Each structure stands twice: as C-alpha cells, then as structure tokens.
Amino acid sequence: MREVEATGSTVRELLEDLSARVPELGAKVYDGSEIQPYVNVYVDGEDVRTSGGLDAPVRDDATVVLLPAMAGGDDRGGSNQASPRAPSSPGATDTR
C-alpha cells in the first residue's frame, strides 16, 4: 500500500490534485473527466459510485482509497463440478 497526500473538497478536486502531484498515478486513476472503469474509489469506506460519484464530498480528515478492480478466475478447468461420464463398457477407451 502506498500513501500520498492530495487535497480537495470533492472526489473530482482530489483526483485533479492527485493527478497534478503524481501524474503517472493520476492518469491511471482519472482521465480528467471520469474515474477509470477498472478503479474503485472509496471515501471513508463508502464506494463513491453510491455516494455522489466525482461530486461526492471529501472531508479534510477523510481517508480515500483507490483500489484497482480485480478480474478473476482462470480457465484451467478448476471447477468443483464433476464431469458427466458415460458408464464404462469392457474394452472402452476414454478419449478425453
């Protein structure tokens, strides 16, 4: 985890300040008009999508967390479901 200082009375102002202070981080989080789709932003534990978006207020002592969205899973067949199998007959070969 990395902590950086930024100021603003709304999420938009805070992200603009962050972008000016740390441009390489700011560009990954905020494109100047909206939060990047793969980033979740929380103000004091509340997702800004449900509390006003970019216009959500930010108190002076607030904690703002920028969390990259996690994509998950793999396609390597890690399913817990058993594959259906036909009953074996003598001399049959499984070709899977």
Image (cartoon, rainbow, N blue to C red):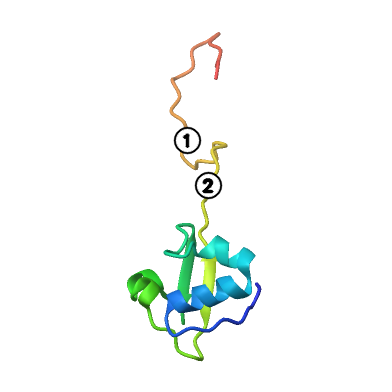
Identity of the residue drawn at 42% across and 81% down: 10
Q: Amino acid at mark 2?
A: Gly
Name the residue that disc number 2 marks.
Answer: 73
Most extreme residue toward the right is 2
Q: How many discs appear?
A: 2
For the N terminus, give its image quadrant: bottom right
Up-down relation of residue 93 to residue 81 (above or below):
above
Identity of the residue drawn at 51% across and 52% down: 71
Name the residue that disc number 1 marks.
Answer: 82
Up-down relation of residue 84 to residue 91 (above or below):
below
Secondary structure under tag 2 reads: loop
Q: Amino acid at mark 1?
A: Ala
Secondary structure under tag 1 reads: loop
Identity of the residue drawn at 42% across and 64% down: 33
Mark 2 and mark 1 residues within 8 Å of each other at the beta carbon:
no
Tell me residue 35's x, y (percent).
45, 64
Neighbor class of circle 1 (other Cα within 10 Å; few <14, some 14-19, many 20+) is few
**Circle 2 or circle 1, nearest the eye:** 2
